[in-house]
Amino acid sequence: SVGHLPIESLRLPAETVILLKRLGLRSVAQLYDVPRASLAQRFRSDANVGKSHRKREREALKLAGSVLCRLDQMLGKS
């Protein structure tokens, strides 16, 4: 299992790793346990403060998609 590995093992940009850690997600297992639909919502609420709602929404969805893509690649699902 790869669950014990740190978030950094997903080879995400440093700013994404920082955001994930700010959200309390430090391991692959913790990220895997987050419902996929709520990941973008978590990013929306924590990142992009001061930006318009539409821009926050787009950026949160893009960021969540890239994180989930890397997670799926690590798990051999893509």
Image: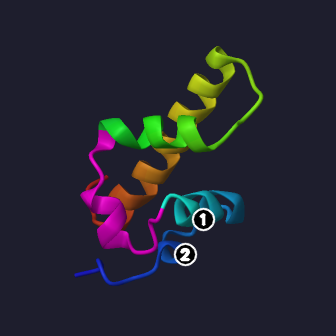
Q: Which mark is residue 8?
A: 2
Reply above or below: 59 against 52.
below
Dot 1 corresponds to which residue?
17
**Quarter of the image where one finds residue 37:** top left
Q: Which mark is residue 63?
A: none
Q: Which residues are magenta?
A: 24-36
Residue nearest the observer in this picture, 58 or 73: 58
Query: Is 59 within the magenta?
Result: no
Reply above or below: 4 against 49.
below
At x 39% / y 82%, what residue is drawn? 5
Query: Is 29 within the magenta?
Result: yes
Q: CA distance from mark 2 to mark 1?
A: 7 Å
For marks 2 and 1, the one nearer the N-term is 2
Mark 2 near mark 1, Cβ–Cβ under 8 Å?
A: yes
At x 30% / y 53%, what residue is drawn? 34
Q: Quadrant of the N terminus?
A: bottom left
Q: Amino acid at mark 2?
A: Glu
* Residue 76 located left or right of residue 27: left
